[in-house]
Amino acid sequence: MARQEFPLEQQLRKDIQDAQRARDQVKLDTLRMALGAIHNLEVARTDRKHSEYGQPLTEADTLKVLEQEIKKRSQAIVLYKQGGRNDLVEKEQREMDILQSYLQSSQLSDEEVRAIVERLVAEQGKEFRRVMPLAIKETKGKAEGARVQRIVKELTQ
């Protein structure tokens, strides 16, 4: 029995076809890699040794995979710059931009994150260690952890 695809995956598949028609090889390779990474997570969950064994894939999981791929590229850009490989820096930057376009629509703005954190501070008090885990849990897959941490620090000072 095949599982239902999420809107994000459907969009990736549609954009792969568009990239094929436009003969945009970088975009095509990037989107195929993203779908492959999502598929790899799904396959990994069939392994009994995997910590999330047997759990179905969720939309949040697909977003998390894209975030991980973006993070890999941002780390690679730093290393390529240190090595003086500007050609690879440009390639990684283009791939990162392509992937980020898929996260933009599902990401919370700074104002939305700030509103969530302000509500948590009002409920829990101004203690960073009490607010941060709750903020991360509530914004999981919708905002970058570093951004959430910065806002929580700002509001719990």
Image (cartoon, rainbow, N blue to C red):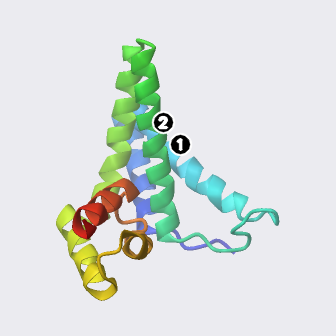
Q: What residue occupies the far top of the structure in this picture?
A: 84
Occupied quadrant, residue 10: bottom left
How far from the left and from the top, in percent, is residue 79?
46, 24
Report the front residue among 49 and 119: 119
Q: Which mark is residue 33?
A: 1
Residue at image mark 2:
29
How far from the left and from the top, in percent, is residue 69?
48, 45
How far from the left and from the top, in percent, is residue 74?
41, 36
Which residue is painted at 65% across and 61% down in the image?
A: 42
Report the front residue among 115 and 100: 115
Mark 1: secondary structure: helix
Asked if residue 62 can be seen in this view, the reply is yes
| Label 2 Cα neighbours within 10 Å, binned few <14 / some 14-19 / many ≥20 | some
Occupied quadrant, residue 14: bottom left
93, above or below 156, in the image: above
How far from the left and from the top, in percent, is residue 41?
63, 57
